Amino acid sequence: MMMMTDYVFPTLGEAAQALLNSTGLLAQKNNPSEILKDEKAKKTFQTKLRRLANEEGDVEKSFQDVAVYLLGLVTEATRDIRVANAFMASVEDLYHSFRNAKREWATYLDKENTVRWLFECGLADVVVKSAQKYSLMYGLAVSELSSPVAPNWWLPEFAEDKVVWPLEKVWCWIYETADTSQSRFHNPNGEPGRAQQNLENVERWFNRNRLPQWGELVTNLESSLALLAACPDPKYKRTLTESEVKSFRVHLFFARMATDVLKAIDKAFGREFIRQLCRDMKAQNRRLAQMHAQWKAEIELELTCIGPLAGREYYAFWKEAVHGRWAWFNHLMTPGLRAFQELLSRKEGEPLSLAELKQARGMLPSHILAALMRMLRHKLADKDKAFAEFFLEGVKLRKLPDLSVDRIEAYKKRIDAAGQSGTLSWLVEWMYATYFYRRNEHRAAYPHYRKAFDLAKHSIGEDTYLLINQYAESCAKNDKRNEFSQVIRWANHNGVKIRWYRGEDDHDKAIELAYTFLKMASYPVV
């Protein structure tokens, strides 16, 4: 039988670790990074990353430390601070979206299928929106950087017998930009040695499904460009501009990361899933591109009225203009989202009719409506309905004023017999904790609160607030000061508020104040 801990969202630290691994920046071989210039520096960083993934110590500080490292590493890789800032803004959007999903949604799925649901019903849309939003906001869309003509260069193309992954698509764009073939780009003189090795490496990356680390990739690019520029034969000699070379680096970086993530999705969830995911992302990319193209034209017109701006002023204007439009857009969406929610409430789970879909199109922009409709595609299977029924029964039982040990044990037997103990054992522990709390038996309640929290902290969505607050109170009443501090830090990191805690961070005085009040507090209804 699976343990409850398998029915969870990944931790924020695990998500951060997966993102960093996808960049290919951590491999030491051929890595030109000054930040990770020796094995000791790399191990220090990996220790921070591991502690974050395992939620050890001060998780919020660990997360901020890792974010600083990541900004530096991406700046080194792309050699463009605006690209790195746009990337980190996108990462921050993903972070908040993921954290909100954990805080608001409960999961009855194992970790792998919870991740599948996250991609299908939220994260993929955030990736598309953030990539476009911050590309425009940080001026990348109006900078000297050139891009592949194909708008979906960062997504794979599927044929019956082959998949063209983003990394291969970007290499082909580089060859086209240089107006040469693959073989002449990497080995312009047609000689054995390093040049031939470069060519064979790229062919191996394409044909043998091997993904290079960033150090290998950029070393190959720089070596090949040097050979092209030094080639004595004018037929094959090529000299690329500085902006072209920077564009190559930037696009190879993001193409490598996209390829890594998408191949992992393909391996975990299958070809049909990733085909549909990419179709959805392409459609969202097209819808958002239309809106951003209109905004871009409006901002360019404003610039002609203001007069020429240079350097920082120019990019600051773009950032403020795009930010202002997105803020206004989000404000305008509130009534439409409310009306759509009211429409769904009236339907009581029934599918929308054609007339109602047309009505919904008048409420919301197409990209938002498409994301919401995708979430509505998910129907509960019979086994999932059984979980929902037992869950609702357990929630109701825990709140009964005459909750008893006999009732708890009877409920536990029923969920065990139905095969739901893996998903609902946390609720049984919470019932026991509630029972003892009401009897003022705080020492007896504490181990049940602790176990309930350990089992449920990454899986129960909105109920996390009440459970973690009761657990924190139990820690205070049982003189578990260090454990109380860890609960506060975990709550901060995951965006959950704690009663009486008034600190913006984990300041000792704020923690001590909350500890003192919760030690004395008594809540009659829990």
Image (spheres, grey):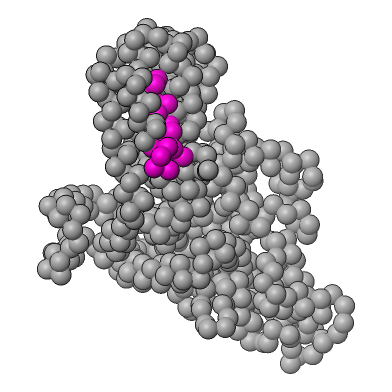
Depicted 121 relative to depicted 482: above or below: below
Q: In which quarter of the image is residue 289?
A: bottom left
- Judged left or right of residue 89, residue 349 is left
Q: Give the range drawn in magenta.
A: 415-434
Q: Quadrant of residue 100?
A: top left
- Judged left or right of residue 278, residue 42 is right
Please tell me whether residue 419 belongs to the stretch shown in magenta: yes
- Extreme residue toward the right, this view: 193
Q: Which residue is drawn at 15% across and 70% down?
A: 354
Q: Position of residue 445 (x, y in %)?
A: 43, 16
Q: Does residue 99 appear in the picture of this structure? A: no
Depicted 309 relative to depicted 416: above or below: below
Q: Position of residue 422 (x, y in %)?
A: 46, 40
- Judged left or right of residue 432, residue 3 is right
Please tell me whether residue 285 belongs to the stretch shown in magenta: no
- Extreme residue toward the bottom, this view: 235
Q: Does residue 437 appear in the picture of this structure? A: yes
Q: Quadrant of residue 213?
A: bottom right
